[in-house]
């Protein structure tokens, strides 16, 4: 009879093998795509589009822009695939490239209009039930600067110096934007 601890260790090992198998498969697909194999690149697209879309949606705040940014990220990945050396997993490389694409687009958008530090508007009457959906809707309603910093810091795990460098802002500005975002989310979610 197998003990509970042995079962969880085996499950963890199986998951790690599946992930490393996926990373190995991605590396092979990336090499084939570098050589011009569009079918291999399409497989990479199918394997990574979901996570990349979720990132774009959180950072952009709306589905239309997220779809455009996702496509731009994959176009850029195709153009820059020759720079993928395999030092990290393709998914890690593509995630960073996607963040850079989104940040670049949002930085350009922010330059075209003045900074908006308004609080989140009231929740729409048609808001979906459930805390997660409420949180996603509240994040989407944040002003661009606050939303971007919040997602990068609290969702993606970037630190303030990294965010400041990505966005071309001061570290203090990043901290202020995060504070404003958290305050607005608490107010919006009634916490």
Image (tube, rainbow, N blue to C red):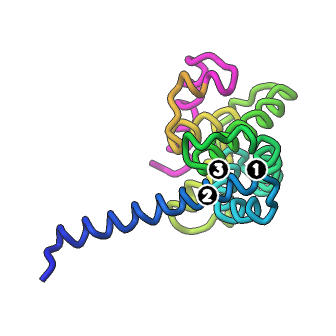
Which x, y percent locates residue 74?
A: 77, 51
Q: Residue at x 76, y 63 (%)?
A: 42
Is residue 43 shown above or below 156? below
In magenta, the rendered stretch is 164-191
* Numbered disc total: 3
Element carrying mark 3: helix
Mark 3 against mark 1, which lies toward the viewer?
1
Left or right side of 191 for 178: right
Q: Residues within 10 Å of mark 1 (few under 14, many from 20)?
A: some
Extreme residue in the bottom direction: 1
Left or right side of 61 for 131: left
Left or right side of 108 for 58: left
Identify the disc placed on residue 34: 1
Q: Nearer the viewer, residue 155 or 12?
A: 12
Which x, y percent locates residue 82?
A: 75, 41
- Our reading of the magenta stretch's main secondary structure is helix
In the picture of the structure, the residue carrying the numbered disc 2 is 26
Q: Nearer the viewer, residue 102 or 113?
A: 102
Q: Nearer the N terminus, badge 2 or badge 1? A: 2
Element carrying mark 2: helix
Cα gap from disc 3 to disc 1, whole angstroms: 25 Å
Q: Is residue 143 visible?
A: no
The quarter holding residue 180 reads top right
Is residue 156 shown above or below 134? above
Q: Quadrant of the N terminus?
A: bottom left
Left or right side of 137 for 153: left
The quarter holding residue 112 reads top right
Identify the disc placed on residue 107: none
Q: Nearer the N terminus, badge 3 or badge 2? A: 2
Element carrying mark 1: helix
Q: Residue at x 61, y 22 (%)?
A: 164
């Amino acid at each position: 009879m197998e003990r509970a601890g042995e079962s969880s260790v085996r499950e963890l090992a199986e998951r790690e093998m599946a992930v490393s198998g996926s990373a190995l498969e991605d590396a092979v697909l990336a090499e084939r795509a570098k050589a011009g194999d569009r079918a291999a690149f399409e497989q990479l697209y199918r394997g990574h589009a979901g996570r990349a879309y979720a990132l774009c949606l959180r950072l952009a705040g709306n589905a239309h822009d997220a779809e455009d940014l996702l496509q731009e990220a994959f176009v850029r990945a195709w153009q820059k695939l020759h720079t993928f050396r395999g030092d990290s997993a393709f998914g890690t490389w593509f995630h960073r490239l996607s963040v850079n694409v989104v940040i670049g687009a949002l930085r350009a958008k922010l330059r075209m209009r003045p900074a908006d530090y308004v609080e989140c508007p009231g929740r729409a009457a048609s808001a979906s039930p459930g805390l997660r959906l409420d949180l996603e809707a509240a994040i989407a309603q944040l002003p661009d600067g606050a939303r971007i910093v919040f997602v990068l810091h609290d969702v993606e795990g970037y630190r303030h110096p990294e965010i400041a460098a990505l966005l071309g802002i001061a570290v203090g500005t990043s901290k202020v934007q995060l504070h404003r975002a958290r305050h607005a989310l608490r107010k919006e979610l009634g916490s």
